[in-house]
Image (spheres, helix red, strand yellow):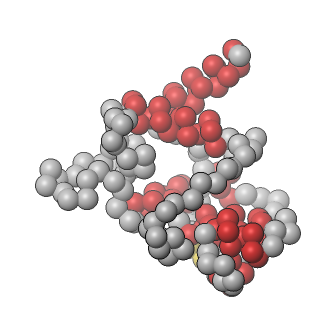
Amino acid sequence: MSKTDQAGKGDSRFIKDREDLQLVRRARAWLAVLHELGADAPDDPLFRSLTKKGKLRKYPEDRKRGQRMRPGSLNERLQVLADRAGLPYIAGQKVTSHSWRAGANTDMIAAGVTLKDRNWAGRWAEGSKTADTVYDRPHDDGESDPLAKVPLYGGPAHAAVAEAREQQEQQ
């Protein structure tokens, strides 16, 4: 259930595996990391909280919420990566997990995508102006990508990515 899906029906969306994003390869690498960490049982959640060293975060046995990430985990991880890249702020604003939504929306605005289509893609309510008023954050001329400084495959994921690349090259 979410703000835009009160009935909790969910929504499937096709996302093309763009060459510059390589979402399928990255998802496979993440699944390989989960396997390496022993966290890939059928009932294990896909998104898990990791320590700064790339290990699974330990939770007390009696924890009622299970092994899933707590709400702030993604935000904390993204801020660690932004700090490592030397860019904890972009255009004077602290990098947060909402920066991902803003970046995608800002790119869609630059490409001429309509507000209606951006609302659908961002799961904002139909007719909402949030995509234009909150999540439009151009920060430069588009020539520099601050997230390019963040290592994409550090830690235990590196071996899985190298193996996936090797397999792809052999095909």
Location of residue 55 in the rendering, given as x and y in whole percent from the top left corner = 35, 42
The x and y percentages for residue 64 are 20, 59
Q: Nearer the viewer, residue 107 or 147?
A: 107
Residue 43 position (above or below residue 67) = above
- Farthest residue, direction top: 170
Where residue 158 sits: x, y (%)? Answer: 53, 32
Evaluate whether residue 141 shows in this view: no
Q: Can the viewer see residue 68 in this picture?
A: yes
Q: Is residue 132 left or right of residue 100?
A: right
Which residue is drawn at the image coordinates 59% and 43% (left, top)?
152
Q: Residue at x 45, y 66 (%)?
A: 8
Percent from the top left, x then y, of residue 47?
Answer: 42, 50
Q: Residue furthest left?
A: 62
User: Is residue 94 left or right of 40 when viewed as pictured?
Assistant: right
Q: Quadrant of the C terminus?
A: top right
Closer to us: 81 or 7? 7
Instruction: Write the residue at 47% across / 73% down.
Output: 6
The N terminus, quarter of image: bottom left
Q: Residue at x 34, y 42 (%)?
A: 44
Q: How many marks?
A: 0
Residue that lies at the very extreme toward the right in this rendered image: 112
